Image: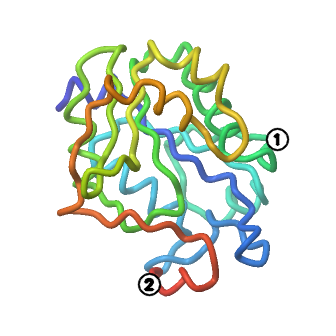
């Protein structure tokens, strides 16, 4: 685990503006008494990521002021309104030259995914060619682990809100699926009705 911890960076996508939440950025939603982005960073760290890069977009300055993100590399995505693809590109670009050999990508709006799921996916890392993802009852979800050998092509193809979905679909036979349905719940906080999942 120590070796993985040094080689795999956590990459948290937290730039969205919460359009379906009345324009409340998801990073700033309150969960267990603190901003959701702060909770998500702690999950990555507790799961074994030694370094964490956080992609910010909507109201980035306010997120910096309100959330305790010391020790994280904060990445501004000026194109956040284009969707998750732009945040993934910005995040992977921030890892270039960092020494990281893989990125474990998680989304800020999935508080039901905790450290145990992160640790499971992190645990299958073997090389820069590794491609792995958490699965929930056999269905691929987050977090997703991209070895550095995949970054250039993901960066070239990640667009809109689909992120790396097309890249993963084209390589589904190469993905190591790690079942996490017994330790995590993969719901998203997308609409006001979903706010019941926050504490």
Residue holding disc 2: 199
Residue drawn at point x = 54 percent, y = 13 percent? 97
Residue visible at 48% across and 76% down in the picture: 31
Above/below status of 105 relative to 199 = above
Asked whether the residues under the numbered discs 2 and 1 touch, taking CB atoms below 8 Å apart as contact, a structural biologist would say no
**Crowding near pointer 2: few (<14 within 10 Å), some, many (20+)?**
few
In this view of the protein, which residue sits in the foreground, 36 or 130?
130
- Residue to which mark 1 is pinned: 78
Residue at the image point whose x is 35% and y is 26% from the top: 131
**Gap between marks 2 and 1, in whole Å?**
30 Å
If you read the primary sequence from the N terminus, does the residue marked by circle 2 or circle 1 appear first? 1
Q: Is residue 55 above or below residue 184?
A: above
Label 1: few (<14), some or many (≥20) within 10 Å? Answer: some
- Left or right for 143, reference 67: left
Q: Residue at x 26, y 31 (%)?
A: 176
> How many marks overall?
2
Picture coordinates of residue 67 (x, y %)?
Answer: 59, 62
* Residue 119 horizontal side relative to residue 185, left or right: left
Local secondary structure at mark 1: loop
Q: Position of residue 51 (x, y in %)?
A: 42, 35
Where disc 2 sits, the SS reads: loop
The one of 7 and 139 positioned closer to us in this rendering: 139
Quadrant housing the N terminus: top left
């Amino acid at each position: 685990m120590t070796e993985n911890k040094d080689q795999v960076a956590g990459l948290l996508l937290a730039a969205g503006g919460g359009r379906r939440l009345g324009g409340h950025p998801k990073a700033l939603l309150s969960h267990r008494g603190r901003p959701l982005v702060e909770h998500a960073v702690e999950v990555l760290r507790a799961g074994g990521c030694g370094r964490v890069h956080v992609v910010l977009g909507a109201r980035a300055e306010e997120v910096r002021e309100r959330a305790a993100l010391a020790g994280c590399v904060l990445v501004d995505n000026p194109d956040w309104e284009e969707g998750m693809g732009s945040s993934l590109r910005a995040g992977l670009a921030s890892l270039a030259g960092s020494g990281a050999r893989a990125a474990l990508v998680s989304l800020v709006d999935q508080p039901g995914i905790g450290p145990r799921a992160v640790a499971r996916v992190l645990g299958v890392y073997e090389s820069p060619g590794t491609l792995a993802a958490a699965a929930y009852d056999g269905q691929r979800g987050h977090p997703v682990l991209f070895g550095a050998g995949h970054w250039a092509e993901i960066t070239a193809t990640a667009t809109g809100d689909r992120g790396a979905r097309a890249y993963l679909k084209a390589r589904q036979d190469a993905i190591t699926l790690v079942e996490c349905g017994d330790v995590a719940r993969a719901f998203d906080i997308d609409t006001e009705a979903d706010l019941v999942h926050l504490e």
